[in-house]
Image (spheres, rainbow, N blue to C red):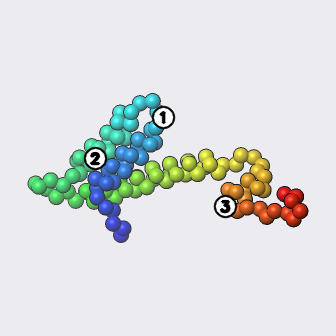
Amino acid sequence: MAVLGSPLRTLRALLRELRQASGGAGRPYRDTPAYRHILAAFRNHRVTSEKLCRAQQELHFQAATYLCLLRSVREHAALHQEYHGKGERSPEEVAGLVGFRLPQQPGGKG
C-alpha cells in the first residue's frame, strides 16, 4: 500500500484543488458545500488524546482518492483544451506540437 503522507497536507491540497475548480464561479470557494463537507469530515475524524479514531485512515485514503480525481479532471480539461481538434493543421504545425522540425529542401525551397 502506498504511503499517504500527512492528513494536513492532503487537506490543504484538497482545498487548493477546490479553489482552482471554482475559479470563476463568482463566489468564494469557502461558501461551497464541498468545502464545508471536507472540513467537517476532517474535524470529525481527527485523533484526540481521549480516543483513537480508526476511521481516520479510511477518511485519509478517501480524501487522497478524491484529490487524485480533482487533479486528474483539471489536468484532463487543460490537455483537452490544448490538443482538441481545431480543424486541419499544417504539417509544420503538427511537427512543432510534438517537438520536431521538418527538413529543409535543398535549393531553399521550403
Q: Residues within 10 Å of mark 2 (few under 14, many from 20)?
A: some
Nearer mark to the viewer, of 3 and 1: 3
Q: Give the amino acid type for the residue marked by disc 2 in the picture.
A: Ala
- Secondary structure under tag 2 reads helix
Q: Give the amino acid type for the residue marked by disc 3 in the picture.
A: Gly
- Between 16 and 42, the one lying in front of the other is 16
- Secondary structure under tag 3 reads loop
In the picture, the disc for residue 99 is 3
- The answer to which image quadrant residue 19 occupies is top left
Q: Position of residue 16 (x, y in %)?
A: 39, 46
- Secondary structure under tag 1 reads loop
Q: Could you tell me if residue 32 is visible in this image?
A: no
Residue, disc 1: 24
Q: Are marks 2 and 3 in contact (CB under 8 Å)?
A: no
Q: CA distance from mark 3 to mark 1?
A: 33 Å
In the picture, the disc for residue 41 is 2
